[in-house]
Image (cartoon, rainbow, N blue to C red):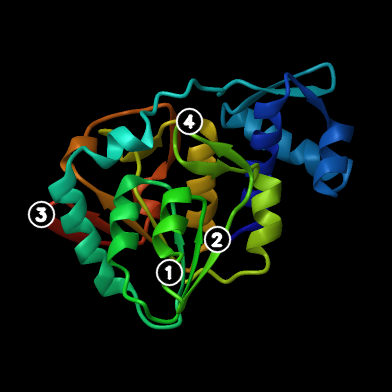
Amino acid sequence: MKIKQARHLCILELLAQQDALSVSQLARSLHVSHETIRRDLGQLQIQGEIIRRHGCAKSINQTQDVGITFAQRAKSHISPKDQLAQQALSYIENDMTLALDASSTCWYLARKLPNIPLTVYTNSVRIMETLVRRENIRVIATGGVLSRKYQAYLSDIPHLLALLRSLEIDLFIFSCEGLDGEGVLWDSNDKNARFKALLIKYAAQSLLLMDKSKILRKAGAPICNIEEVDIRLFERQNAAG
């Protein structure tokens, strides 16, 4: 993962939590120089992510949460999610370190995981509950603030980076809310999208699970372009990048 990309995600996460932040505040939070922050802000401004006024930066991409509850998602499109979870098993081997997002599709996958030596890093409460009795699977929680709506922990990017530095993720498996006509993957809100964007950059490989209901659809916040994902599994077809 490129350090600069991770730092940009951190800046956007911090700005999403505040109305505006100064260069000095950002430099202190990220433990870098003022000049580094100024360069980062200049690049983010060119990309249309922020605006800069009077020595401060402000996000212009804050979005509303458009997701539905985990309980609702778990009961929809059951057959394709089960099919995708079964396909994903073929990419999992003994002693791997996996990262699983809090999607209902990954929950279907967790229910199918064999009791083999694995490490599973996840923000999903439901996945943790599912794996609690599989003694050969080591489970690491992201921590953060519990979202009852998503049955998941939502963490800020600096916190996630601190934990990820101690891990080597072999494979990040995730789903999303939509894939638009330009190849951009979308999720329900900024926090979920940035969590997935960070894991895609950090993991050795990433694997997307997507049923047909997500095709040609936008949601609350963009994650990345689908070309950045290494392996893509779609309902009734398998496309690997």
List x then y, in percent, for residue 1: 58, 61
Q: Secondary structure at mark 2?
A: helix
Is any part of residue 211 visible from this angle?
yes
Q: Quadrant of residue 54?
A: top right
Mark 1 to mark 2 CA distance (whole Å): 28 Å
State yes or no: discs 4 and 1 in contact (Cβ < 8 Å). Answer: no
* As drawn, 207 above or below 193: below
Mark 4 to mark 2 CA distance (whole Å): 20 Å
Say which residue appears at 55% left-offset and 44% top-offset.
153
Q: Which mark is residue 189?
A: 4
Q: Secondary structure at mark 4?
A: loop
Which residue is nearer to you in this view: 186 or 79?
79
Which residue is nearer to you in this view: 169 or 55?
169
Say which residue appears at 40% left-offset and 23% top-offset.
66
Disc 2 packing (10 Å; few <14; some 14–19; many ≥20): many
Is residue 186 rendered to the left or right of residue 29? left
Which residue is nearer to you in this view: 15 or 67?
67
Sequence-wise, the earlier of marks 4 and 1 is: 1
Could you tell me how many numbered marks the image carries?
Answer: 4
Sequence-wise, the earlier of marks 3 and 2 is: 2
Say which residue appears at 39% left-offset and 28% top-offset.
67
Residue holding disc 2 = 202
State yes or no: discs 4 and 2 in contact (Cβ < 8 Å). Answer: no
Q: Spot the residue most to the left.
A: 236
Residue holding disc 3 = 236
* As drawn, 234 above or below 25: below
Mark 4 to mark 1 CA distance (whole Å): 32 Å
Q: Spot the residue most to the front.
A: 133
